[in-house]
Image (cartoon, rainbow, N blue to C red):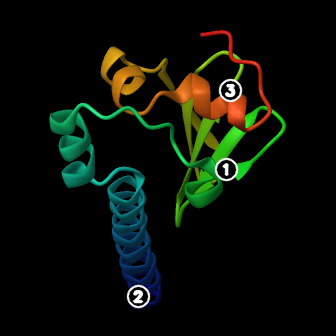
Amino acid sequence: MRTFFSIIYQTFFVLGLFSSFFLLFGLAADFRSLEKPKESMEMKRINTVSPIDFELFFELSPQGVVKHGFVSDYHIDCTSGIITFTIRGEFDLRYGHFSNRAFKVYNPADACRAGGFTPDF
């Protein structure tokens, strides 16, 4: 009887280990796909201001735009400017508002207006 329970414990341990590994791998892949550092640094050096192309990277939602990843979703509320990460549809992490650098480099207010929203930031 003891070996039966130890086999079950080991099986659940291995399954938990694999699921944790894939969760971390998916999160890393999602966050790496959000912004390419080389492109943003080039834009900062050139001092070019161009709005985010929402149609290319994001899908429109009633509140703003959303980018779906493997494990997490990246939401931008186009009325208040709040950035939210949702992990597996269950855990919401409000990141905050756009930074001064984001306003200069990406120009999110113009991109939200182009998407049909009225930004309040």
User: Is 23 positioned to the left or the right of 68 in the image?
Assistant: left
User: Is 11 positioned to the left or the right of 84 in the image?
Assistant: left
Give x and y (percent) for residue 94. 53, 25
Give x and y (percent) for residue 12. 45, 76
Counting residues from the start of the chain, the first of labels 3 and 2 encountered is: 2
* Proximity of marks 3 and 2: CB atoms separated by less than 8 Å: no
Q: Residue at point 43% right, 84% down?
A: 11
- The quadrant the C terminus occupies is top right
Q: Residue at point 37% right, 53% down?
A: 31
What amino acid does circle 3 point to? Cys
Counting residues from the start of the chain, the first of labels 1 and 2 encountered is: 2
Q: In this view, does 95 lie above or below 16?
A: above
Helix, strand or loop at mark 1: loop
Which picture quadrant has residue 103?
top left
What amino acid does circle 1 point to? Gly
Between the C-alphas of marks 3 and 1, the distance is: 20 Å
Closer to us: 4 or 42: 42
Q: Which mark is residue 78?
A: 3
Between the C-alphas of marks 3 and 2, the distance is: 51 Å
Query: Would residue 112 be seen by someone viewing this image from the given angle?
Result: yes
Residue, disc 2: 7
Helix, strand or loop at mark 3: loop
Query: Would residue 77 be seen by someone viewing this image from the given angle?
Result: no
Counting residues from the start of the chain, the first of labels 3 and 1 encountered is: 3
Residue, disc 1: 89
The residue lying furthest to the right in this view is 62
